[in-house]
Structures are given as structure tokens and as C-alpha cells.
Image (cartoon, rainbow, N blue to C red):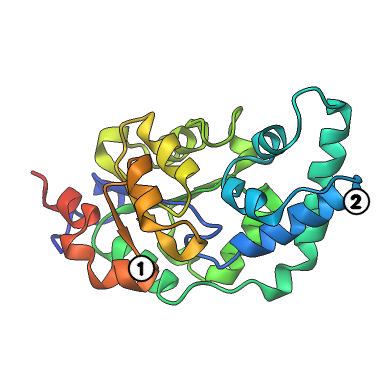
């Protein structure tokens, strides 16, 4: 892949979602939300929860619970999800090829940023799971955005952190909410199906292409949207 230039001369960027994209955590989040809802006396089907994972916690709760509910309970539900998810931290594993993908993007001259809806404390654990900090220029979490995905605030924060406009970046994510958020900024999204959302649904949401997992994207990086971005004059 063409080298874009080292260090501060980097002129293109690749933004990555983390949960379900680089780290195998989507179903752990599903379980954590399910238990949080059960603790609040609410029975929400796991399938519905999984289809909402990738949104910010506030929007996930709002999507899954009735509009006429007592919303003063929402904060407690989100806190319960965080507490339950923290018990799964030791089980977190990076997807095969995740670290290598980040390294290849970095070594090819891209600015690399994590743009995640995770809480700051969860993102720190996810980063330690990846063991790839030397290949990451910036990372933004839910704490860096006023509105969570599918709003684009987190991606805007990531772009600002690496000093690039939206037109010089590609996003890699696993959920339709990632695609919607990037689409609002005109950023092409590569969809990975390892988070549990199928290729057809990601493409319908607007993804420019899909791959099975980080290893699959890495093997096809030159021909992907990342490679096309690198080849631009």
C-alpha cells in the first residue's frame, strides 16, 4: 500500500470502532444490558438488545423501553450495565488480526484513531486488550461527545484529535449505528460482520463494503476503501 508519509505528515486517517469491531465484546454487552434490565424488573429480549448494541447507552435505553416510562430510572439502568460489563473485563479478547490491522494502517502512514461509544473506563480496558497503543494516535470515548452514536459527535472528536477533515478518513465499524454516524459526515464505512450484524444489513445501512473480521480486512487492505484512500493524490 502507498505510504502517505510518516509522523506529523500524515494526510489520511482511519477511524475504528472498538466494541465488536476490534474486540469480541458485542455479546458480552448484550448480556450486561439484559441483566441490567432484569435488575430493574424489565424483560427485554436479548435479540432486541443485540441489534441496539453500538448505540450510546442513553439512546439504547430510549430505543428499547417505552416512551411513557419513568425516565428517572434510566441512569440506574445504565450504571447497572456498566457494573455488570466490568465483571466481564477479564474475558475480553481482541479479534484475530486486530492489532496487526492497526499496525499496518499506522505503518502505511495513516493517522489511526479509535472512535468508540464506550465509557472512558471501558475504553481503557479495551485498549489494554488490544495491546496496540504504539499504533494509535488518538482515542475518543462517550466522554468526548455530547451526543452518542448514531449521532456523529464521537467521530468529529476523533477527527479533531488527529487534525483531519472528514473527507480524508475512512471508518471501520461493526454496527449499523457506526455506518449511520459516519454517513452523517460523509465518511465511508467499512463494515465488519464479527460483531454479529450481517453484511446485507450493513450494506443496506450504507457501508461501502464488508469483511468478516479484522484479519479479513487486513488481507484485503490494498483493495479496500483504506487502500483507495491511500491511493488518492
Question: In the image, is 117 to the left or to the right of 82?
Answer: left
Vertical comparison of 96 with 63: above or below: below
Q: Position of residue 164 (x, y in %)?
A: 32, 37
Judging by the rendered image, the residue that carries numbered circle 2 is 39
The residue at the point 49 percent across, 72 percent down is 95
Q: Position of residue 211 (x, y in %)?
A: 32, 63
Question: In the image, is 152 to the left or to the right of 84?
Answer: left
The residue at the point 44 percent across, 77 percent down is 96
Local packing at callout 1 (Cα closer than 10 Å; few below 14, some 14-19, many 20+) is many
Judging by the rendered image, the residue that carries numbered circle 1 is 101
Q: Position of residue 202 (x, y in %)?
A: 38, 49
Count of marks overlaid on the render = 2
The residue at the point 47 percent across, 60 percent down is 21
| Distance between the alpha carbons at the discs numbered 1 and 2 | 38 Å
From the viewer's side, name the closer residue of 5 and 89: 89
From the viewer's side, name the closer residue of 46 and 105: 46
Asked if the residue under mark 2 is in contact with the one under mark 1, i.e. CB atoms within 8 Å, the reply is no
Disc 2 element = helix
Amino acid at each position: 500500500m502507498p505510504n502517505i508519509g510518516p509522523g506529523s505528515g500524515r494526510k489520511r486517517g482511519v477511524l475504528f470502532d472498538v466494541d465488536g469491531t476490534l474486540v469480541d465484546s458485542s455479546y458480552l454487552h448484550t448480556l450486561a444490558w439484559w441483566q441490567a434490565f432484569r435488575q430493574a424488573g424489565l424483560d427485554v429480549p436479548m435479540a432486541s438488545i443485540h441489534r441496539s448494541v453500538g448505540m450510546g447507552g442513553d439512546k439504547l435505553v430510549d430505543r428499547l423501553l417505552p416512551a411513557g416510562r419513568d425516565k428517572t430510572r434510566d441512569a440506574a439502568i445504565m450504571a447497572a450495565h456498566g457494573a455488570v460489563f466490568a465483571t466481564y473485563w477479564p474475558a475480553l479478547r481482541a479479534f484475530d488480526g486486530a492489532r496487526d490491522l492497526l499496525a499496518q494502517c499506522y505503518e502505511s502512514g495513516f493517522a489511526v484513531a479509535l472512535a468508540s461509544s464506550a465509557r472512558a473506563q471501558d475504553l481503557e480496558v479495551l485498549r489494554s486488550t488490544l495491546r496496540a497503543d504504539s499504533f494509535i494516535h488518538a482515542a475518543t470515548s462517550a466522554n468526548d461527545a455530547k451526543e452518542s452514536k448514531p449521532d456523529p459527535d464521537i467521530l468529529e472528536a476523533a477527527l479533531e484529535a488527529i487534525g483531519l477533515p472528514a473527507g480524508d478518513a475512512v471508518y471501520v465499524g461493526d454496527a449499523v449505528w457506526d455506518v449511520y454516524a459516519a454517513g452523517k459526515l460523509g465518511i465511508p464505512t467499512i463494515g465488519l460482520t464479527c460483531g454479529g450484524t450481517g453484511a446485507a444489513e450493513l450494506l443496506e445501512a450504507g457501508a461501502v463494503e464488508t469483511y468478516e473480521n479484522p484479519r479479513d480486512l487486513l488481507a484485503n487492505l490494498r483493495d479496500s476503501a483504506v487502500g483507495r484512500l491511500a491511493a488518492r493524490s
